[in-house]
Image: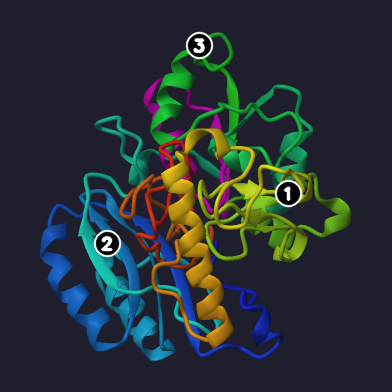
């Protein structure tokens, strides 16, 4: 996979004209025992260049999404790649007219994508890549056990036919699901895994190999690379791919999808779900209506009123919870600094506190993609 992939502009107002804000989703597994020493200089560089977003540093590598003037973003990418351990850093980028983040944070974490299993070395132990052009042939192999390692709300709107759905609410639940699949996922099995942008598969395939399953592969560049590179007429993908940015979902060629985001629980909603009487824009949907209190709903409604007023005035509403889980395609968890999404999965807005926290079962509010 190349270390630089252009994604289409996500701001509808931008049209074919490239916007002035460059957003880059990035990740790299590498040995960074000195990650704490990198934090201060990276924060200073981002601040000096007008770059905002979220970078996660951990002993296992770096993951994040940043946005700002092109010169500032390129300076950060160059600084990261100047470290020989991060020279092969992967990033995906797109342009827009608006800065999607409110602040810049460089944070120290135990993992750049949270699996919760000590000793997994994704830098050395990940499975073999399969290029998007070769993925269909693998899907035709009846001996292959195909596993979608994404979360339930992502799988619900699209996947490859025949893939096992772990039904997980977070990436950290995957090891437990794998424990329950001993009959299918055992030494000698042929396993193929896929996720949005690649980062989760780096770690999940390393986990399987650590458990003695050597014949395990994963889709290089993730679903996004497949949708971008495989012609629609040849594509086996069914549905849309949830992304951790303001596009919400994409289809063949990374064209914007048809799903919208519930601003309360942050789940992707199709046309039928938006037609439900339980759907109130910015307040609730059929997934979360029964899980929030009337006080929370009132707070969400007030937040939505403020958003509408800000939109009418042509200004940004700082407290608007973002559809994004910063990401890189590597990505964070169910919190502003989590680690559950896919690198390169997209980039989007930083989440504001809004009128209240999203339900615990909601997708992450922010965190490096995907």
Q: Which residue is nearer to you in this view: 304 or 81?
A: 304
Residue drawn at x 49%, y 41% is 201
* First-in-chain label (3 vs 2): 2
* First-in-chain label (1 vs 2): 2
Residue drawn at x 45%, y 66% is 320
Quarter holding the N terminus is bottom right
Which label lies toward us, 1 or 2? 1
Distance Cα–Cα, label 1 vs label 2: 42 Å
Whether residue 324 is visible: yes
Q: Does 87 sit above or below residue 22?
A: above
Q: Which residue is mark 3?
A: 182
Stretch of the chain drawn in magenta:
194-221
Q: Which residue is mark 2?
A: 85
* Image coords of residue 348 (percent x, y): 49, 67
Numbered badge on residue 2? none
* Image coords of residue 183 (percent x, y): 56, 8
Numbered badge on residue 270? 1
Task: Name which quarter of the figure residue 167 lies in.
Answer: top right
Q: Secondary structure at mark 3?
A: loop
Residues at circles 1 and 2 in contact by the CB criterion of under 8 Å: no
Q: Secondary structure at mark 2?
A: helix
Whether residue 4 is visible: no
Circle count: 3
Whether 268 is among the magenta residues is no
Q: Which class describes the residues within 10 Å of circle 3: few (<14), some (14-19), or many (20+)?
A: few
Q: Secondary structure at mark 1?
A: loop
Whether 215 is among the magenta residues is yes
Q: Which class describes the residues within 10 Å of circle 2: few (<14), some (14-19), or many (20+)?
A: some
């Amino acid at each position: 996979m190349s270390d630089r992939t252009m994604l289409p502009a996500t701001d509808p107002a931008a049209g074919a004209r490239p916007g002035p804000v460059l957003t880059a989703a990035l990740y790299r597994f590498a040995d960074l025992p000195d990650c704490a020493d990198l934090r201060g200089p990276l924060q200073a560089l981002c601040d000096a260049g007008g770059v905002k977003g979220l970078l996660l540093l951990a002993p296992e590598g770096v993951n994040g999404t940043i946005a700002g003037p092109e010169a500032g973003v390129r300076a950060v990418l160059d600084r990261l790649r100047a470290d020989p351990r991060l020279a092969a850093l992967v990033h995906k980028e797109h342009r827009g007219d608006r800065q999607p983040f409110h602040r810049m944070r460089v944070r120290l974490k135990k993992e750049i994508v949270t699996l919760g299993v000590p000793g997994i070395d994704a830098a050395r132990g990940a499975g073999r890549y399969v290029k998007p052009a070769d993925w269909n042939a693998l899907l035709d192999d009846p001996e292959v056990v195909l596993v979608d390692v994404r979360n339930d709300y992502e799988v619900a709107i699209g996947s490859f036919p025949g893939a096992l759905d772990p039904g997980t609410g977070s990436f950290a639940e995957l090891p437990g699901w794998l424990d329950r699949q001993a009959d299918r996922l055992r030494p000698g099995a042929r396993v193929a895994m896929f996720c949005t942008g690649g980062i989760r598969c780096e770690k999940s395939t390393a986990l399987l190999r650590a458990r003695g399953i050597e014949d395990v592969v994963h889709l290089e560049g993730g679903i996004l690379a497949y949708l971008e590179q495989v012609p629609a007429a040849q594509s086996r993908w069914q549905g849309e791919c949830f992304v951790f940015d303001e596009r919400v979902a994409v289809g063949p060629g990374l064209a914007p999808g048809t799903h919208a985001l519930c601003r309360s629980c942050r789940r992707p909603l199709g046309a039928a779900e938006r037609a439900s009487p339980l759907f109130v824009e910015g307040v609730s949907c059929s997934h979360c209506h029964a899980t929030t209190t009337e006080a929370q709903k009132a707070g969400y409604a007030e937040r939505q009123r403020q958003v509408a007023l800000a939109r009418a005035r042509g200004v940004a509403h700082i407290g608007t919870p973002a559809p994004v889980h910063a990401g890189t395609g590597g990505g964070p968890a169910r919190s502003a600094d989590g680690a559950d999404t896919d690198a390169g999965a997209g980039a989007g807005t930083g989440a504001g506190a809004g009128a209240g926290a999203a339900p615990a079962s909601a997708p992450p509010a922010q965190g490096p993609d995907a």
